Amino acid sequence: MNRYYWILGAFAALVALLAVGLGLNPRDVPSPLVGKPAPAFNLTVLATPDKTLGPKDLQGKVWLLNVWASWCVSCRAEHPILVDFSKKSDVPLIGLNYKEVRGDGGFDMSKMSAEEEKKFAFQRANAWLAQHGDPYKLTVMDLDGRVGIDYGVYGVPETYVIDKAGIIRMKHTGPVTPDILGQKIMPLLAELNK
Amino acid sequence: MIPELGHFALILAALVALLLGTLPLLGAHRNRLAWVAVARPAASALALLVTFSFACLTQAFVANDFSVVYVAQHSNSLLPIQYRVAGVWGGHEGSLLLWMLMLTWWAFAVALLSRQLPEVMVARVLGTLGLVAFGFLLFILMTSSPFERLLPGAAEGRDLNPLLQDPGLVIHPPLLYMGYVGFSVAFAFAIAALLSGQLDAAWARWSRPWTMAAWCFLTLGIAMGSWWAYYELGWGGWWFWDPVENASFMPWLAGTALIHSLAVTEKRGSFKNWTVLLAISAFSLSLLGTFLVRSGVLTSVHAFATDPRRGVFILIFLVAVIGSSLALFAWRAPKVGLGGRFALVSRESLLLTNNVLLVVACATVLLGTLYPLLIDALGAGKISVGPPYFNAVFVPLMTPILFLMGVAPFARWKEASVPEIARAVRWALLPAVVVAIALPLIYGAWSALTALGLLLAAWIVATALLNFAERVRHTRAGRSFLAAALSQPRHFFGMHLAHIGIAVFVVGVTMVSSFQEEKDVKMAPGESVDVAGYHFTFKGVRAVDGPNYAAARGEFDLAVDGRFVRTMHPEKRNYHSSAMPMTEAAIDAGVLRDVYVSLGEPIDRARPEGEWAVRVYYKPFVDWIWGGCVLMALGGLVAMLDRRYRIRSRAAATVATPAGSQQA
């Protein structure tokens, strides 16, 4: 033993910290909404633009809310997992299309009327689902992102688990991976549906 | 086809690196001259292969080959050519390849410029670099190849992040990486010395110019990043204590300590263990910085696409490189002699104090950077550590360093006398106090902290001039003052130049944080606003089209005392490829102040011809911050070119080469 070994000890401690750090997600900010009622909304349904949908229509069911947009690259990454999920599970998966046109950034919103924006958004969202598959029981359109603000959306995609009483039980920020689906979401859904 | 050639060259490079990392080291250990002789050609081959590979990737960018995933992700056919070339290092994979390119160039430079060193030493140095290169090449090939194909190819690329489409960011990463990677040479010298057991003055002398070169690049790289943040991000700040900035600042602090400690080891044979440890630390901190940026462990504005697999790989690499070198150090260090003795007050003790303070500063940055991670790992919540912490710990640590910077050049080696130093520096106190009292009053408000900053800056300049004059007087020997002044050694010029650079930097920081003014206002065309005597009139906004963006360009008339100075054009750019609007501030730069206008958002999005949110800044002395950095780097460059690194090493070569071949 010599007096220089403490350096190795200090380094080992640093490595241990970094190794633990690798397993954590710094973006995984705990949502203050977990444990609170899902904020109410009443938004137009993509497939049937004359109808609207809100959390109260799903009262009594355990359901998932997935925030997506056609301009969101990470949504494309999680999409096959959602499509697969929708084939295997009968838990309703509701899509919340978030700022379909405004969020894209490629358009000059001052030159677009509200009617044009709506038409364009529906067209884009439908085309995207037609191309990549539609895992959603229904998708609602949050054109101006107001519902997104109520839900504290700060990165698309995000996924919420909401229980029979309409309480948010879990929020996941970023793309859903098979691990997160299998190890966190599915067990939670099974427990809530018991 | 060309990307495949690039990929293939990279695989070959990994094999060559493995060869370079094993044979010469074994040869040096077992006295096999033939194995030792592999080092130089292998290092050259490695540099050639990686350069070829890099050229292949560049070609894919220039030719808009969107069948390469990396190109499709970071380029676009509308992207101007200079940004297509810079796009090569616009993402994770390519910037790693740039890292690699620079590592092999450093190794090649060592191979080329080390004719005077013993062959065995060169073999150990290049061998160590070869092992590091091998690790990085494996990392690139296994987790982050930039040559992966997208079949069928994309019709159009996604475009380079608009934040990176800027001349500042074209040169910032290469400079920074040159610095990071350059410390690998000092590291390799330290490892070679530990392996051979010869930690002596010769080793310190060989290491010094290399360390200095890396330090100069790092200084410029950090300054460039800071300057870019200032003019591009549009909020007028120049340093944010972001984890990634800290990742570059930590090796800088350790490297600065290393430069000073190497001086003691060379001149007096003391601090050997300490110097080796610093050399290992400086490079280890560069690697740690890479880990922190690439693994996604910390959140930062520099969000590279993160991938846990990469994090695991770098962590393993980190353990292998740093762990083995620290183990080697712990094993060898107890056998290293202590070197020359020195008194409580001496040049050595002052430099030791400098070292301790710099290392403590480095440790506080490390603590502040990793603390959020530690709290998260303990499950105690999410926190972030910001400027208040860093500013609070930095001022008390830097104050003694800056004070001693003025004193240390007057202290003799071995033993110095306090009264003697005090007599020598007493005349510096007068101008320092005058500046500290007068300058803040001229700018309208005197505060203790402002005065302290200016006092220290003026102190450094005054003592540097006094020290220079004293040395010239002592070495005059009948010549004219000017002739004697010009004949001073370059390392002496370099030292004072770099120290004056620090003083200039301190003036900039002190003045801008004490006297800057900013206004956030809502302006309609025709309205005007006054900041610190500057009168801005908003003339309106019009739409302008760039090659791959559409911009709203504002027009402002700047006037002082009713006199028109110039028209300024800040822009708000919407790149076709990105949702994030970019701010291009308009800056009227000057020696004593910058005035700075940036456009926010239109108050009513539907009426861009109406009112806009506008930010106006007055920033006194802000350019001194980067000017100081340039002087520091210049000082390093001058010191590095000191004649004795060449003359003495040539003398050493005649002695060392036979000794080397006997060993081998």
Image (cartoon, grey):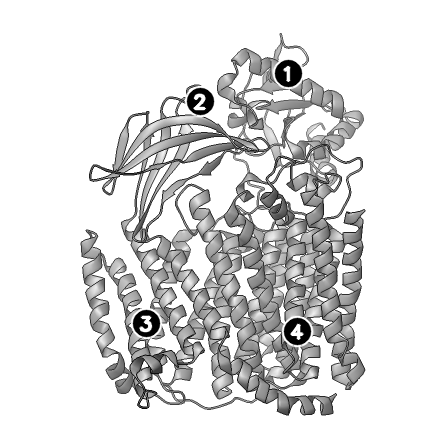
Mark 3 falls within which chain?
A: B
Q: Mark number for residue B550?
A: none
- Circle 4: is it few (<14), some (14-19), or many (20+) Cα within 10 Å? few
What chain does mark 4 sit on?
A: B
The mark lying in front, picked from 4 and 3, is: 4
Find residue A131 and report its horizontal and vertical position in percent.
75, 23
Front label number (2 vs 4): 4
Label 4 sits on residue: B112
Residue type indicated by callout 3: Phe
Q: Which residue is mark 2?
A: B605
Q: Secondary structure at mark 3?
A: helix
Q: Chain of mark 2?
A: B
Which one is in front in this view, the residue at disc 1 or the one at disc 4? 4
Q: Earlier in the sequence, mark 3 or mark 2?
A: 3
Judge whether A23 appears above or below B79 on screen: below
- Could you tell me how far apart the alpha carbons at marks 4 and 3 are, in whole angstroms? 41 Å
* Residue holding disc 3: B403
Mark earlier in primary sequence (4, 3): 4
Q: State whether residue B39 is above or below residue B344.
A: above
Do circles 2 and 4 both sit on a common chain? yes
Mark 3 burial class by Cα count in 10 Å: few <14, some 14-19, many 20+? some
Same-chain check, marks 2 and 1:
no
Q: Quadrant of the C terminus of chain B?
A: bottom right
Mark 1 vs 4: CB contact within 8 A? no
On screen, residue B450 versus residue B107, left or right, reads: left
